[in-house]
Image: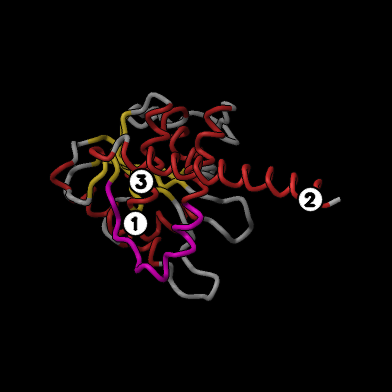
Amino acid sequence: MMKIFKKILIIGLIFFGMSALFVLWANIKIDTDYEDNITSNLGNLPNEKVGLLLGTSKILANGKPNPYFFNRIKAAAELYHAGRIQNIIASGDNSRKNYNEPEDMKNELIKAGVPADKIYEDFAGFRTLDSVVRAKEIFGQNSFIIISQRFHNERAVYIAYQFGIVAYGYNAKDVNQYAGFKTNAREKLARAKVFWDLLFDVEPKFGGKKILIE
């Protein structure tokens, strides 16, 4: 019995070690492969027809405003008012009753001075992969600027290039290290899952009618 237990333990440790190395490799690769395309400086970005604003909840579970959300809204409005983008795709989750990320983003963008007719809502942006690929397949864009926090932009830009999209990331202000610990820890695993999705040719959950932005 003890020998069997030792074998199971050894196999478990080997599996854990290999998994940890894979997660580390995935994070380093996504950190570095397109780092020149990701910036917090408007002057380092090209002019693009579209900015892809990635969704998150407007309100946290504790009822407080979500700083990730509002910092992204501010960054998207900056891009628009600086003339770097002409339109914004607000892509997020609308899978539950009374929860509508694209609508929340659109309303806040309008408050920030972005005209309503320049905002396109993508209600099926359930995952980063969905948002990025749908910007190409549904909205007809082969190049665009992605708007989120830096850690998220790195993953989104990497995904974009795997689908033949030329993408840039404009970094919204991050939150402090303590407030963002859970989000950043989850991001480490999400980066490993990128390669699983690519290996198995995972596609967006929903297609839909094309809404070409011209």
List the single residue furthest toward the front: 3
Q: Position of residue 82 (x, y in %)?
A: 16, 49
Residues at circles 3 and 2 in contact by the CB criterion of under 8 Å: no
Residue pointed to by mark 1 = 72
Identify the residue at the far right of this view: 1
Q: Position of residue 104 (x, y in %)?
A: 45, 59
Relative height, residue 80 to residue 182 (above, below): above
198 relative to 84, above or below: above
Q: Which residue is mark 3?
A: 153
Image location of residue 96, percent across then percent down:
63, 55
- The residue located at (54%, 40%) in the rendering is 193
Q: Which residues are magenta?
A: 170-187
**Residue type marked 2:** Phe
Relative horizontal placement of residue 6, taking residue 109 as reference (left or right): right
Where is residue 171 shown, x and y percent of the image?
28, 51
Front in this rendered view, residue 105 or 178: 178
Residue 66 lies in the magenta-colored region: no
Residue at numbered disc 2: 5
For badge 1, the amino acid type reads Arg
